[in-house]
Amino acid sequence: MKVETVSIDKIKPYENNPRNNDDAVANSIKEFGWQQPIVVDNGRVIIAGHTRYKAAKKLGYKEVPIVVADNLTKEQVNAYRLADNKSGELATWDDDELQEWLIVLLVVKA
């Protein structure tokens, strides 16, 4: 996987993106920086990372990190768009482990 940094104007949102995203990711990028690139196809159309793209626009970024998924067929690109968005929704939480993590985070912030 090769991560490139490109002008934000060189990539395009997928016009049929069915997901409604909010801008909460902007706070994460401000706090932690870019930790996950935007995935695009050969035409530089976003496959995964629409929310990161919107956050970058909101924050005034001129450049963003991308990965070109040039090894996927058109059908795989469409399937990946869905899988990338849906897989997080299918996850569940271990409430006991989550509580421990939240306690640790609260103690560190204090």
Image (cartoon, rainbow, N blue to C red):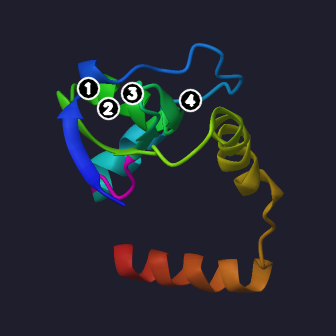
Q: Classify the position of the C terminus by image quarter.
A: bottom left
Choose the circle earlier in sequence order: 4 or 1: 1
Decide if residue 110 is in sight here.
Answer: no
Q: Which of marks 4 and 2 is in front?
A: 2
Q: What residue did someone put label 2 on? A: 56
> Can you tell which mark lies on residue 38?
none
Q: Badge 3 local density, few (<14 within 10 Å), some, or many (20+)?
A: some
Residue corresponding to mark 3? 44
Label 4 to label 1, Cα distance in Å? 19 Å
Q: What residue type is labelled 2?
A: Ala
Whole-Å distance between the Cαs marked 4 and 3?
A: 22 Å
From this view, report whether residue 34 is shown above or below residue 26.
Answer: below
Q: How many angstroms separate mark 2 from mark 1 (CA)?
A: 8 Å
Q: How far apart are marks 1 and 3 (CA)?
A: 10 Å
Numbered badge on residue 8: 1
Query: How far apart are the two marked residues, 4 and 2, measured between alpha carbons?
Result: 12 Å
| Tag nearer the camera, 4 or 3 | 3
Across and down, in percent, residue 105 comes to 46, 76
Mark 4: amino acid: Asp
